[in-house]
Structure formats: structure tokens, C-alpha cells
Image (spheres, rainbow, N blue to C red):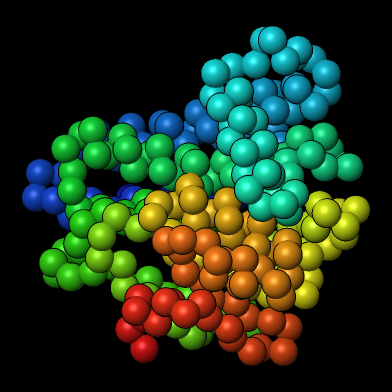
């Protein structure tokens, strides 16, 4: 059973390959993503994060999920030497660099609680997989050429419960900034893909590593349990030492 839709300005795909897949389960995931969008979207004037940025909600009145995201964001800032920071000069707080992966992971847990073992959740190309695909094989996921989105330059095979996230400028333009150097645009590279033990971990570290520029791939290399693939502005690819064990070609 598979459902595709557009939400939060991104394509969302949910596929369950277990024989007992139920439409109601997918509806629960979609409802959860609506909840996340209404709470964390910086584009919606009625969202909680927008109201916080306008000074309409005091910290003592933050929702539990907002408190959790702020706590996780601060933790990530510390773990990345300040290269992940939800504080922006233009619009206050913007936790989107963490919220997407966090929300995908939470959505996957909804499906796990529903009893499913084989599925994936894809939001804007950031993906959490569980189990196997319908051919009882590892999930096959393509990494797009940042200079030509119609081309797949790497195919990775995820056969367990991993997450994969890509940060880059080739789809949304310059939307990631270097918070360490006065929020300068992070434009030394065009794409950085991270495979991690789950999509929350992969997504937050992909965002931070991209902001580091060409040094980001070495940051991923040093992280235990993570692999990455980076493409610079000249089109040169650099991969971590264990990345190849995931590649199909």
C-alpha cells in the first residue's frame, strides 16, 4: 500500500509492503505530518514557532513538542561545534533543519506501533526504512545528480532500519547557512548525503555537515555509525571510508 501527497512544500511518500497494510495506518501518519506542519512551519503565521518568533508565547508556555525540539536543537548545536543552530538573524528560530528528520522518525514509530515491519517514509528525499521492500530485498534509494536532477549518480541499498538524508542547494537554493561564520551562505559544496542509524540522526548531522562546507565529509567520517557522500561545486564526489558497503553501483 502506497500513498503520495505534497505537504510542507515537499513530496511525501509512505509505502507499507506488509500483507496486512491498512489505509487507516497511513492516514494516521498523514495526520501527524499535518500536526507537525501546523506547529513548526515558519511560513504559517498561526504556527506555534511563528507565534514564538513574534513574542506572543513565553517560554514557560511552549508545548511539550516545542520544548523537545528546542532541547534536541541545543544538543545538536553542542555536538557539531555550533554548525547547527536554529537561531537565525532574519526570522528568529527556524528548527526545520532538525524537525523534518525528527518528524519522519516519529511517523515511522506510528507505523511500528501499528505492527508493521516493512515500510518506508520519504519526505522531500529524506527517508526512513524498515525491513525489506516488496521483493524481500533491501530498499534501493537513488542519490540525484545535483547538476541534473533527472540523473541518479549513486544507488544505495538499505536493508535494515536506517535513515538517509541529503542536504543541498540544488533544489531549494541557498537555504542552509554557516552559523559559525555570521550566517554566511553555505555554498562550498552542492550536496551532502548521510546514512545513519535513523533518519533523525542522519538529517541533523547532514544539515550541520553541509554548513561546514568541504570539511563536512570529514566530520561525518569521524562520527561512529554514520557514512556520507559529498559533491562539491566542481562535481567531484568524496565518500566516507564505509560508504561503499551501502552502494549498488
Q: Position of residue 94 (x, y in %)?
A: 72, 39
Whether residue 36 sits left or right of residue 117 in the image: it is right
- The relative height of residue 153 versus residue 218 in the rendered view (above or below) is below
Q: Position of residue 226 (x, y in %)?
A: 46, 63
Whether residue 216 sits left or right of residue 23 in the image: it is right
Quadrant in which the C terminus appears = bottom left
Residue at 54% x, 70% y: name it: 221
Residue at 29% x, 55% y: name it: 161
Q: Position of residue 148 (x, y in %)?
A: 60, 83
Whether residue 208 sits left or right of residue 29 in the image: it is right
Whether residue 121 sits left or right of residue 86 in the image: it is left
Residue at 76% x, 12% y: name it: 58
> Does residue 184 appear in this view?
yes
Residue at 40% x, 52% y: name it: 198
Q: Residue furthest left?
A: 19
Residue 8 in which image quadrant: top right
- The relative height of residue 104 versus residue 233 in the rendered view (above or below) is above
Q: How many marks?
A: 0
> Does residue 125 appear in this view?
no
Q: Position of residue 129 (x, y in %)?
A: 32, 56
Q: Nearer the viewer, residue 150 or 103?
A: 103
Residue 166 in which image quadrant: bottom right
Amino acid at each position: 500500500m502506497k500513498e503520495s501527497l505534497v505537504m510542507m512544500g515537499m513530496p511525501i511518500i509512505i509505502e507499507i509492503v506488509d500483507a496486512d497494510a491498512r489505509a487507516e495506518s497511513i492516514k494516521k501518519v498523514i495526520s501527524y505530518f499535518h500536526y507537525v506542519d501546523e506547529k513548526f512551519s515558519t511560513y504559517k503565521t498561526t504556527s506555534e514557532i511563528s507565534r514564538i518568533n513574534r513574542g506572543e508565547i513565553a517560554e514557560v508556555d511552549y508545548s511539550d513538542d516545542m520544548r523537545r525540539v528546542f532541547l534536541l536543537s541545543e544538543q545538536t548545536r553542542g555536538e557539531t561545534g555550533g554548525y547547527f543552530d536554529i537561531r537565525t538573524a532574519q526570522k528568529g528560530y527556524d528548527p526545520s533543519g532538525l524537525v523534518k528528520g525528527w518528524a519522519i522518525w516519529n511517523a515511522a514509530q506510528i507505523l511500528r506501533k501499528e505492527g508493521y515491519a516493512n515500510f518506508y517514509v520519504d519526505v522531500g528525499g529524506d527517508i526512513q526504512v524498515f525491513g525489506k521492500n516488496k521483493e524481500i530485498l533491501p530498499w534501493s534509494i537513488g542519490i540525484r545528480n545535483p547538476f541534473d536532477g533527472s540523473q541518479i549518480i549513486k544507488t544505495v541499498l538499505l536493508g535494515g532500519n536506517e535513515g538517509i538524508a541529503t542536504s543541498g542547494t540544488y533544489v531549494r537554493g541557498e537555504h542552509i547557512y554557516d552559523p559559525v561564520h555570521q550566517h554566511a551562505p553555505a555554498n562550498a559544496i552542492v550536496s551532502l548525503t548521510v546514512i545513519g542509524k535513523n533518519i533523525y540522526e542522519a538529517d541533523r548531522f547532514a544539515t550541520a555537515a553541509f554548513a561546514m562546507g568541504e570539511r563536512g565529509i570529514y566530520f561525518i567520517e569521524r562520527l561512529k555509525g554514520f557514512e556520507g557522500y559529498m559533491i562539491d561545486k566542481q562535481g567531484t564526489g568524496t565518500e566516507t571510508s564505509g560508504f561503499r558497503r551501502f552502494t549498488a553501483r
